[in-house]
Image (spheres, rainbow, N blue to C red):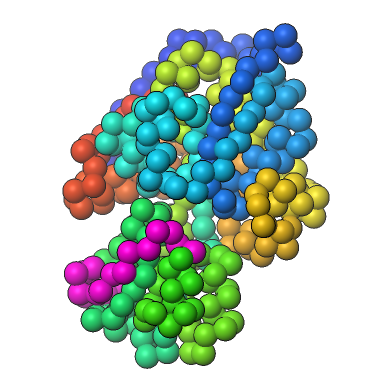
Amino acid sequence: MKKSLKKALLPAALSAALLLGTASVSAAETEDVTMAFCTWTGYAPMFIAQEMGYFEDAGINMNIEIIEDESTYAALLVQGSVQFLATAQDPNIKMFANGAPARYVLAMDESCGADGLVTTADVQSLDDLAGKTLALDTAASSYYFFLTALEDASSLSEEDITLVEMSDTTEAGLAFMGGQVDAAIMWEPELSEALDTVEGAHALVTSADYPETIMDSLVVTEAYAQEHPEIVEAVSEAWYKAVDYMKENPEEAYEMMAGGFEEVTAEDIAGEVEGLVFFGREENEELNNSEAERSIMAISQDMADFWMEKGECETNDLTEFFSLLG
């Protein structure tokens, strides 16, 4: 049985802003805002919002910082160095559960095949991983995907496998392609490259088999949400517009999305989008329905309970994390 979440009241200022339809600030009151995320296609519609002027129209001077070291994210939130942070949902939950002042804003995307466990030909089931070497980044959201699959479809625990810690998921993929390990948790574009170039390589399981395990979300610091509810709403609106634009104008959108990253092409974006599902306004409204069986609250509670059991969370009470939803 899923644990239910008590609905938290919106801060008074945010409630008033939503009732009045206030989703922007005046041009004379341009607000400097910083958002951070790593190089990943799932976050790239934010570059569409920037290029199309959606932030500017709302009176926001948006500074997007690309920060690849995800281990620094909690510190950025605590220090207030960034106001908004986009990363995977389970790291967001773990940061909140361990004291970071994060508040959930919206769901951005979910992986449906863009992440996977790739192995050599002799590994035909998860149980065959016993005693094998597997490269992965335990700080990445794909770690939750891996442990969920292992618990669901094998008789093994992670102690039965020789885990080789990598600094990131890309490095894990490269280790597999270099013949250093028997298996690896990787994402695109390394996933497709490994399948194409390594003889006998195959995807044992992918995020398409466990689609709710790798989701990306946007969070905001608690203090900023209380002080600037209209900016939180405006950033949400900019995201929804950007997702709509991407769906209606994919070629132009992929160019803008690639342009925000270094050494990423529109072709790279187009390939990675195939393994992702983006969440616009309608999808977020469905996810935010606390009465639905697979609401964002229920999905997140599964994550929190899982990491609490693993000793990675100090609490699994997500009431305050979702306090902006009402």
Q: Please provide percent x and percent y for residue 313.
A: 24, 42
Residue at screen point 58% across, 75% down: 193
In which quadrant will I find the C terminus? top left
Residue 189 image-quadrant placement:
bottom right
Does the magenta-highlighted stretch encompass residue 155?
Answer: yes
The foreground one among 77 and 209 is 77
Q: Please provide percent x and percent y for residue 152.
A: 29, 67
Residue 269 as seen in the image, left or right of residue 69:
right
Above or below for 269 versus 248:
below
Residue 175 image-quadrant placement:
bottom left
Residue 321 shows up from this direction: no
Q: Which region shows up in magenta?
A: 152-170
Q: Please provide percent x and percent y for residue 277.
A: 58, 54
Residue 73 image-quadrant placement:
top left
Above or below for 62 versus 197:
above
The foreground one among 51 and 9 is 51
Residue 214 as seen in the image, left or right of residue 252:
left
Residue 54 shows up from this direction: yes
Residue at screen point 30% across, 72% down: 153
Number of dots carrying numbers = 0
Does the magenta-highlighted stretch encompass residue 236?
Answer: no
Above or below for 161 versus 230:
below
Residue 258 as seen in the image, left or right of residue 307:
right
Above or below for 189 versus 320:
below
